[in-house]
């Protein structure tokens, strides 16, 4: 009697010794897993809209909350400080206001230190009038004003 493996009704084996039906089933299983993964990733991508986080920063939208307003004060300074490793910080705000930390976040990788020793500094005051009063009593030259009490200043050489 012929063995079942040698019988004409048995499925032929491939090189690895598996029947084509068995390897075809594995291919279908892999395709089903890949398709399911693509659907899950696609739906997550559509739900979270990650490109909106890349193309439009939240503070550039019309946010009127305290943090959005604070972020808009400092984001304009970024191109003017590019390439500087460290800048100083002059302000009438107290530490708890979060102004320096927001400036640090908006200006990274430039480090904003709470000191008036660097040559280039950020001056941050409640309004332009208070900034003018401060600058009138100190030895700094204004490099650029940004309004709303914010300016980049440079220490005058003696």
Image: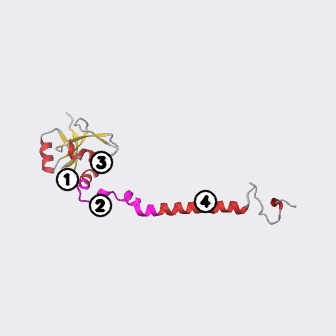
* Rendered image: mark on residue 126: none
Q: Earlier in the sequence, mark 2 or mark 4?
A: 4
Range of magenta residues: 43-69
- Residue that badge 3 annotates: 80
- Badge nearest the viewer, 2 or 3: 2
- Quarter placement of the C terminus: top left
Does the stretch in magenta take in 152? no
Q: Secondary structure at mark 1?
A: strand
47 to the left or right of 15: left
Nearer mark to the viewer, of 3 and 4: 4
> 17 or 146: nearer the eye?
17
Q: Is residue 104 left or right of residue 42?
A: left
Q: Is residue 49 magenta?
A: yes
Q: Is residue 16 above or below residue 96?
A: below
Place of residue 145 in the rendered image (x, y in percent of width and height, measured from the top left): 21, 50
Question: Could you tell me how far apart the alpha carbons at marks 3 and 4 are, in whole angstroms?
Answer: 53 Å
Give the mark toward the camera: 4 or 1. 4
Q: Position of residue 124 (x, y in %)?
A: 20, 46
Residues packed near mark 3 inside 10 Å, few (<14), some (14 to 19) or many (20 plus): few
Contact? badges 2 and 3 (CB < 8 Å): no
């Amino acid at each position: 009697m012929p063995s079942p493996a040698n019988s004409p009704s048995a499925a032929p084996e491939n090189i690895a010794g598996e029947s084509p039906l068995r390897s075809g089933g594995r291919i279908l299983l892999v395709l089903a897993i890949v398709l399911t993964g693509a659907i899950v990733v696609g739906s997550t991508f559509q739900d979270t809209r990650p490109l909106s986080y890349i193309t439009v920063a939240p503070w550039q939208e019309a946010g009127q909350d305290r943090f959005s307003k604070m972020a808009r004060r400092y984001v304009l300074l970024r191109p003017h400080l590019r390439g500087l490793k460290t800048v100083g910080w002059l302000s009438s705000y107290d530490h708890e206001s979060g102004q320096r930390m927001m400036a640090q976040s908006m200006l990274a990788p430039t480090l904003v230190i709470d000191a008036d020793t660097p040559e280039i500094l950020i001056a941050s005051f409640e309004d332009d009038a208070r900034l003018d009063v401060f600058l009138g009593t100190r030895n700094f030259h204004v490099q650029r004003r940004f309004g709303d009490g914010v300016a980049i200043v440079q220490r005058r050489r003696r």
